[in-house]
């Protein structure tokens, strides 16, 4: 999407609405040690397909390693994983709206604090996030310049 619709973002001044910027809670780290009792995945077995996308036997080790690195970076910045994930999403110039949910008021309060983190999201920090998740978009060539499109958009857990 970041490549296909690039011209709309740049020239048309359009943006995207991002659904589930915390990847259904996965980016908070709460599922690293399994499914907590009472969580959405515990209550709704149909949703387990989402969790299995990242925690299947072949992907679990890679996912947890990435989430642990992400947690370390969040800690370095004095933030929670949820705050860093949300800040990364809303800092994207192509995102107009980030739809998130919470099962408890404290979760929403924590996530909204991402706005305080925005000034810390330097290009170096954003590059660290891309390196952790291997998520830098690989664009096709710009047919006007015959060179590659520069990176504009970031997306977590895109491996």
Image (cartoon, helix red, strand yellow):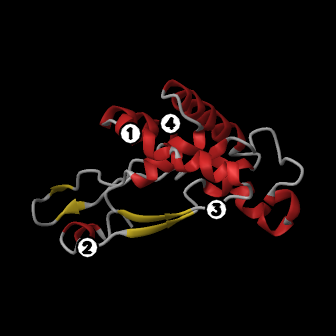
- Is disc 4 surrounded by few (<14), some (14 to 19) or many (20+) residues within 10 Å? many
User: On screen, 64 above or below 150?
Assistant: above
Residue position for label 4: 132
- Is disc 2 surrounded by few (<14), some (14 to 19) or many (20+) residues within 10 Å? few
Residue lying at 59% horizontally and 37% vertically, measured from the top left? 80
Residue position for label 3: 101
Which badge, 4 or 3, is on the more N-terminal residue?
3
Q: As rendered, which of 143 and 101 lies closer to the eye?
A: 101
Residue 116's x, y, as percent?
44, 41
Compared across the picture, whether 86 is left or right of 49 comes to: left
Q: Are marks 3 and 1 in contact (CB under 8 Å)?
A: no
Q: Give the farthest residue toward the left.
A: 145
Measured in 3D between alpha carbons, the distance from the residue under mark 3 to the one under mark 1, in whole angstroms, is: 24 Å
Q: As rendered, which of 3 and 33 lies closer to the eye?
A: 33
Measured in 3D between alpha carbons, the distance from the residue under mark 4 to the one under mark 3, in whole angstroms, is: 24 Å
Looking at the rendered structure, the secondary structure element under dot 4 is helix
- Is disc 3 surrounded by few (<14), some (14 to 19) or many (20+) residues within 10 Å? some
Residue position for label 1: 126
Residue lying at 79% horizontally and 61% vertically, measured from the top left? 48
Q: Are marks 4 and 1 in contact (CB under 8 Å)?
A: no
Residue position for label 2: 8
Which badge, 3 or 2, is on the more N-terminal residue?
2
Q: Nearer the viewer, mark 4 or mark 3?
A: 3
Residue 156's x, y, as percent?
51, 50
Q: Nearer the viewer, mark 4 or mark 1?
A: 1
Q: As rendered, which of 152 and 54 lies closer to the eye?
A: 152
Residue 32, image quadrant: top right
Measured in 3D between alpha carbons, the distance from the residue under mark 3 to the one under mark 2, in whole angstroms, is: 28 Å
User: On screen, 58 above or below 53?
Assistant: above
Residue 1's label in the rendered image is none
């Amino acid at each position: 999407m970041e490549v296909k619709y690039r011209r709309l973002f740049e020239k048309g001044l359009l943006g995207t609405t991002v659904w589930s910027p915390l990847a259904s809670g996965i980016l908070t780290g709460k599922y690293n040690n399994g499914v907590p009792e009472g969580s959405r995945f515990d209550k709704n077995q149909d949703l387990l397909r989402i969790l299995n996308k990242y925690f299947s036997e072949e992907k679990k080790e890679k996912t947890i390693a990435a989430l642990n690195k992400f947690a370390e970076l969040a800690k370095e910045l004095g933030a929670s994983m949820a705050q860093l994930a949300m800040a990364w999403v809303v800092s994207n110039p192509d995102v107009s709206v980030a739809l998130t949910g919470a099962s408890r008021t404290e979760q929403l309060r924590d996530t909204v604090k991402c706005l305080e983190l925005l000034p810390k999201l330097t290009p170096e920090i954003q590059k660290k996030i891309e390196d952790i998740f291997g998520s830098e978009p690989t664009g096709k060539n710009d047919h006007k310049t015959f060179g590659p499109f520069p990176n504009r958009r970031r997306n977590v857990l895109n491996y």
